[in-house]
Image (spheres, rainbow, N blue to C red):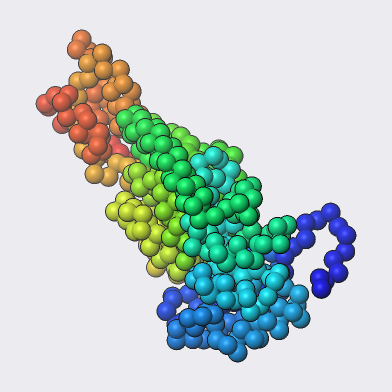
Amino acid sequence: MGRFRPRSTAPVRERAILVGVDLGRSEWSCEESLAELARLAETDGAEVVLTLSQRLDAPVPKTFIGKGKVEELCSYVRSLDADVVIFDDELSPSQQANLEKIVGEPVKIIDRTALILDIFGVHARTHEGRLQVQLAQLQYVLPRLRGMWSHLVGEQTRGGIGSRFGQGESQLEVDRRLVRSRISTLRRELERLERRRGVQSKARWDSGVYRVALVGYTNAGKSTLLNCLTGACVYAKDELFATLDPTTRALDLDEGRKITVTDTVGFIQKLPTMLVESFKSTLAEVRAADLVLLVVDASDPHRELEIRAVRSVLADIGAEGIRCVTVLNKWDLVGAEERHELMSSHPDAVPVSALEGTGTRGLLYRVAREAAEGSVAMSVLVPYEKGLLMKMVHERCQVMRETYVQGGLLATVRADERMARTLAPYVVEDEAEAEPEGAGGPLA
Ligand SMILES: Nc1nc2c(ncn2[C@@H]2O[C@H](COP(=O)(O)OP(=O)(O)OP(=O)(O)O)[C@@H](O)[C@H]2O)c(=O)[nH]1
Ligand SMILES: [Mg+2]
């Protein structure tokens, strides 16, 4: 029997029970992880009515949680009239099916991964983003098809969390073979888009622009920072995974050098591996960056755990070798004492408030310094017919002196490693010594 729900134009929020198991293996305590799960559930439109947890040495193979806990869960599901039970850890397909059988229809049993995939499905806006999410969702669905099949029979209209997979396809029509073939089609399409993105990205490389990627835990303020630095108007909101699709904007540093800043999908602890795999073309934007700005919500009590979670994803995607500057965002929310603590534990970090626009001058100065780091002074003579190269000299290098002579553009520049290699054939002797003192100094 369903609970009485008053007629209203507002969508009915699903009532969710969260379940966590403390296996004593994670840096996050069970409560912290469940609090985050609650935010994820709320982002996905659910109302959390209860949180249950259990301390176990190892998950129970059949039902993940112990027998007594399952009974407790069943009675809460009934007394609280819950629609969905969300486990904080990934359930195996058979655990999920067993639990659904015990708890009984029409209550859905899902896990953190399904919840995140659902949020991604709702938030994906571009064609590529949608394809990436669809791929991850189908990979999740594939081993669970039987379980989903059985509970979907006679239950075609059930909606809500975990049931928006398949993006409009009738789920009853979906069988393993179809899902597999859809997965390969999606992979092919994504590879095609990735090649195109690769070409665009190479074009950006060729134009010699220094690339900065904003990375960080979800909700750290990456999009707000992009907006604040570049005047972009990307979607920024107090919700998890507001951004899925990367946005790149150009920015001129005071010294005249052009850079691009890319905002992209946020990370989270226990990030589903199939999402990392499906989002590899999006995440390639991060890998291709010259500099990573690791944006941290400095006001979050879990900031250190979040930094570690972000670093671990960076390592997973092969981006750990990229130069990285920590940005302590939401500085406006940090008290004086904590500011002091934070600056002593992160002496190299840059504090900013993307919302108030404070500290960004210091941040851009730091970016300019990073861009100049490892750069070399050189004098080059670029022939007039090398128009693109001349453009690159102006955009990518710090030009200290330039004159147009008979043979082309004669310039003394500071170039980063990549540019120095490109310009090597055009180097002329002696001019570098003429570099003025203090070049590459502060922007402020
Ligand atoms: N007080 C304060 N709030 C901020 C600051 N920067 C961002 N916020 C708020 O934090 C919330 C999240 O900001 P976003 O820019 O959407 O965060 P994000 O890192 O892009 O998040 P995802 O795209 O969801 O991963 C928004 O409500 C912002 O207004 C800041 O410096 N100070
Ligand atoms: Mg964002």
User: In the image, 357: left or right of 82?
Assistant: left
Q: Residue at x 38, y 46 (%)?
A: 284
The residue at the point 80 percent across, 56 percent down is: 10
**Residue 190: which quarter of the image?**
top left
* 142 on left or right of 42: left
**Residue at horizontal 24%, vertical 37%?**
418
Could you tell whether 291 is left or right of 164 in the image?
left
The N terminus sits in image quarter: bottom right
Is 107 placed above or below 198 here? Answer: below
The front one of 124 and 300 is 124
Instruction: Give the quadrant of the C terminus.
Output: top left
Q: Quadrant of residue 19?
A: bottom right
Q: Which x, y percent locates residue 228?
A: 54, 43
Q: Position of residue 380 (x, y in %)?
A: 19, 24
**Could you tell me if residue 274 is visible in this image?**
yes
Camera-side residue: 108 or 425?
108
x and y percent of residue 7 in the render? 88, 60
In the image, is residue 57 above or below residue 441?
below
Tell me the quarter of the picture where residue 318 sits: bottom left
Work out which residue is located at the far bottom of the displayed protein and give it.
Answer: 68
* Residue 72 placement, left or right of 425: right
Q: Nearer the viewer, residue 146 or 381?
A: 146
Residue lying farthest to the top in this orientation: 406
Q: Residue furthest left?
A: 429
Do we see residue 241 in this rendering?
A: no
Can you give x and y, in whole percent of width and height, for residue 389 in the image? 28, 23
**Residue at the image position 74 percent from the left and 63 percent from the top:** 13
397 and 249: which is toward the camera: 249
